[in-house]
Amino acid sequence: MLKHTALHDLHIKSGAKMGEFAGYDMPLYYGEGVIKEHLWVRESCGMFDVSHMGQLIIEGEGVAEFLERLTPSAFQEKRQGKAQYTVLTNEQGGIIDDLIITRLSEHQFFAVINAGCKEKDIAWVKEHLPSKLTLNYMEERALIALQGPKAAKVLEETLQCDVSDLPYMNARESKSPCGKDILISRVGYTGEDGFELSVPPDVAQRAWQGFSKHPAVKPIGLAARDSLRLEMGYALYGHEITAQTSPVEAGLSWVMGKNASGYFGEERIREDLEQGTVRKLVGIKLTDKGIAREDAEIHDHDGNIIGALTSGGHSPTLKESIGIGYIDSNLANIGQKIFINVRGRNIAAVVTKLPFVPAKTKSMKKAAA
Amino acid sequence: MAELKFTTDHEAIYIDGDTAWVGITEYAREALGDLVFVELPEIGRQVSKGDEFAVVESVKTAAEVYSPVDGEVVEANDNMEGDLELIAKPLADGGWIAKIKISDPAQLGDLMDEAAYKDYLKTLD
């Protein structure tokens, strides 16, 4: 039996094509198809139901220090309202999950984790949770993402929330028109300006219906969410990043705090930083016709296997075939010519700077290529 | 009246004398969603019934197109590479992917006619 989000009935009513994702019955796309949805987000405003993701509150005295044990990022110095993209690392320096953690107050943080990782993340946090801290998984709470150049305007016009002074990677609590609390985070997974609204289920339904009436808004399914993040080269857990990949080879060293120490897997991550990794995550553009998808082998000129794609597909914005994958570090240079093997045929490709499409997020740090 | 045939893999076939014009059905198109690429077969390739001879790629997935008969690929629809929307047209009006010269006409008897295909679709949902 698949789980439903608070917005499930509304997706069915709007004729969404539904599919299973991480145990949830989720909208893959709506009436107009994936490419139109994708382009709509780039030029207007898309709304996404991402309520399948896990929302946690971790609080208590010493919580910032605890988060610096779970992740290689700096939390003690974070201002209230500041959000940080980071990774939960395991003892081997691999990645348990990637997540955004936001400081709500001195002793309280909010974390949004991947749907497919909820169970193991919560077990991991609980296993290491100091006795004076508490973990609260807000299972009923919904999460709506508004993404696109018109997202701020939509939010202001629909919910009368002024977000003009809310910088990217910052969050603030606000009141919905019905008086309930909404946590608004200026974050996203598309490369556009945008917001994620953490709300109780009844508010989610009203907000979704309210946004639906705005002419700049269309609902967007998980399929376009994937092609949007691929154009940005953003990692997707289980694909680019796994329990075996270190944040260094995944191009995520930038999440690390300057003086990070004492986090899980520090030994390997330090070694990766100092000595370099044997493989690196890179952007890849096909220069010949075709589409290359996850697991396609990457070959050099002589036919040697030098890596594999972790994600790949069509870029609706560029109308080109793109992918991301790991290749031998000594070939991980922008402009390097390579081949992607698709059904036994080698398609010419080139290592390309990420993101494929310029990010519109105001202060988002770029993953090092 | 043109004779249309269908396979259980959702190929649609227009029989023009000794040549089969092969495309995909509306059901297949709807299941695939937005198309982004078609990989055409080489002219002159010998195919057996059931061989993968073309690939239709959508945003979501790659779908193989199988030959409905034994034969030789005599033509590929190059226009489709630049205009994927052609695939939604009737087979004889540009919707064909490739033409296969049929070497064993008896194999056509294994294909479904339109009524049988419609009945078959009803068993799928």
Image (cartoon, coloured by chain):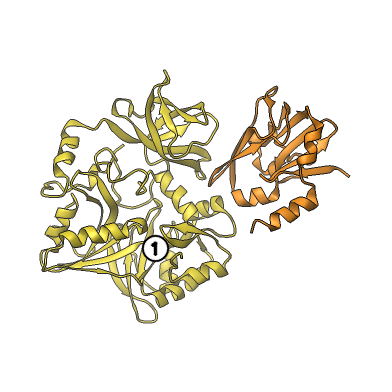
Q: Quadrant of the C terminus of chain A?
A: top left
Task: Describe the element under mark 1 as helix, strand or loop.
Answer: loop
Please tell me whether residue A348 is drawn above or below residue A181 in the rendered image: above
- Quarter where residue B89 is shown: top right
Please tell me whether residue A283 is drawn above or below residue A131 in the rendered image: above
Q: How many marks?
A: 1
Please tell me whether residue A253 is drawn above or below residue A169 in the rendered image: above
- The chain displayed orange equals B
* Residue in view at x 37 percent, y 77 percent: A176
Label 1 crowd bin: few (<14), some (14–19), many (20+), radius 10 Å: many
Please tell me whether residue B87 is drawn above or below residue A168 in the rendered image: above
Q: Nearer the viewer, residue A290 or A93?
A: A93
Amino acid carrying mark 1 in the image: His
* Chain to which the residue tagged by mark 1 belongs: A
Left or right? Give the position of A228 relative to B84: left
Residue A136 drawn at (x, y percent): 24, 69
Residue A78 drawn at (x, y percent): 17, 59
Residue B111 drawn at (x, y percent): 76, 42
- Quarter where residue B82 is shown: top right
- Quarter where residue A115 is shown: bottom left
- The chain displayed yellow equals A
Left or right? Give the position of A263 relative to A312: left
* Residue in view at x 68 percent, y 57 percent: B123
Find disc 1 in the rendering and name its residue. Answer: A52
Inspect this view and state whether residue A202 appears: yes
Left or right? Give the position of B25 relative to A301: right
